[in-house]
Image (cartoon, rainbow, N blue to C red):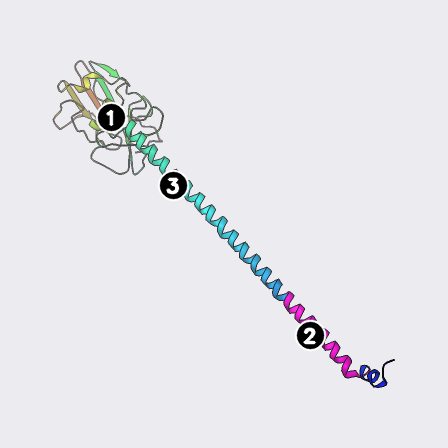
């Protein structure tokens, strides 16, 4: 049996408070430790999440950059292939899209010994449709479409005929056009004022809705003075 003095010491209030304080202090320390650990875990998650975002962002940017580089490479290859297959003629290039900086239309009629020559469709247009020279025909009605980046000196009649001769001779190019004599040229029904040799070498400027007649040999009908352009071709 414990001495009375010991029992009295155990029963003193001060002794009980010290025990509670020890338990409370220990609990506070554990809670603070748990809080620190929670914050550390949250911080690690935040870092991992940010790292994933940076990683996927870098991967996505790299894929887009590679795609852009691939697209540019393919475009360059296509342009080089087009220039090889359809090189510039008289400084007139064959572009993958039709230009609209300078856009007019003229009409051409050719008579050889009194017989009209059909101006074929698709002169100046690649057979696979991959490119268009600045001067070309869409139909066989004699309308020349002039669609260039801007008004240039090499958009005259001789440039169109040279495109026909050099790049599209298989479209029934008349051999007589290479002859240096025997030709008459009329613009809007009036004789061309310059010196006339082969139409391939005679520079006849073309303005909007000009009507040009080429005549070789005899007899030939009167030259055209007017042509009824479709309303869609207002220039």
Q: Are marks 3 and 2 in contact (CB under 8 Å)?
A: no
Check residue 79 in the rendering and tell me which mark sits there, or answer none.
none
Residue at x-position 21% and y-position 14%: 114
Residue at x-position 71% and y-position 76%: 22
**Mark 1 crowdedness (10 Å alpha carbons): few <14, some 14-19, many ≥20:** many
Camera-side residue of 72 and 87: 72
- Mark 3 or mark 1: name the one nearer the start of the chain: 3
> Disc 3 to disc 1, how far (Cα)?
34 Å
On the picture, is 5 further left or further right than 205?
Answer: right
Quarter containing the C terminus: top left
Q: Please name which of the two marks, 3 or 1, marks the residue nearer to the observer.
A: 3
Residue at x-position 61% and y-position 66%: 36
On the picture, is 84 further left or further right than 46?
Answer: left
Reading the image, the residue beneath label 1 is 163
Camera-side residue of 49 and 233: 49
Q: Main secondary structure of the magenta part?
A: helix
Residue extending furthest bottom? 5
Reading the image, the residue beneath label 2 is 25
> Disc 3 to disc 2, how far (Cα)?
65 Å
Residue 192 appears in which quarter of the rendering? top left
Residue 234 appears in which quarter of the rendering? top left
Quarter containing the N terminus: bottom right
Reading the image, the residue beneath label 3 is 69
- Mark 3 or mark 2: name the one nearer the start of the chain: 2
What SS does tag 1 mark? helix
- Mark 2 or mark 1: name the one nearer the start of the chain: 2
The percent coordinates of residue 92 (x first, y second) are: 24, 32
Residue at x-position 55% and y-position 58%: 46
The percent coordinates of residue 18 (x first, y second) are: 74, 79
What SS does tag 2 mark? helix
**Depicted 159 relative to depicted 52: above or below:** above
Start-end of magenta stretch: 11-34
């Amino acid at each position: 049996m414990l001495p009375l003095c010991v029992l009295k010491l155990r029963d003193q209030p001060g002794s009980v408070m010290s025990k509670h304080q020890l338990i409370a202090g220990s609990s506070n320390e554990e809670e603070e430790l748990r809080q620190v650990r929670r914050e550390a875990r949250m911080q690690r998650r935040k870092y991992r999440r940010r790292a994933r975002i940076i990683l996927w962002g870098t991967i996505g940017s790299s894929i887009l950059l590679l795609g852009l580089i691939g697209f540019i490479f393919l475009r360059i290859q296509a342009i080089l292939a087009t220039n090889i297959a359809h090189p510039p003629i008289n400084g007139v290039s064959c572009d993958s899209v039709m230009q609209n900086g300078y856009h007019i239309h003229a009409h051409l009629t050719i008579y050889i010994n009194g017989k009209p020559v059909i101006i074929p469709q698709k002169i100046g247009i690649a057979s696979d449709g991959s490119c268009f020279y600045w001067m070309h025909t869409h139909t066989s009605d004699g309308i020349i479409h002039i669609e260039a980046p801007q008004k240039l000196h090499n958009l005259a009649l001789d440039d169109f005929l040279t495109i026909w001769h050099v790049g599209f001779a298989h479209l029934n190019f008349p051999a007589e056009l290479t002859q240096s004599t025997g030709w008459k040229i009329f613009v809007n029904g009036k004789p061309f004022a310059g010196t006339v040799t082969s139409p391939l070498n005679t520079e006849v400027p073309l303005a909007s809705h000009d009507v040009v007649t080429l005549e070789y040999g005899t007899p030939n009908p009167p030259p055209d003075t007017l042509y009824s352009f479709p309303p869609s071709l207002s220039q």
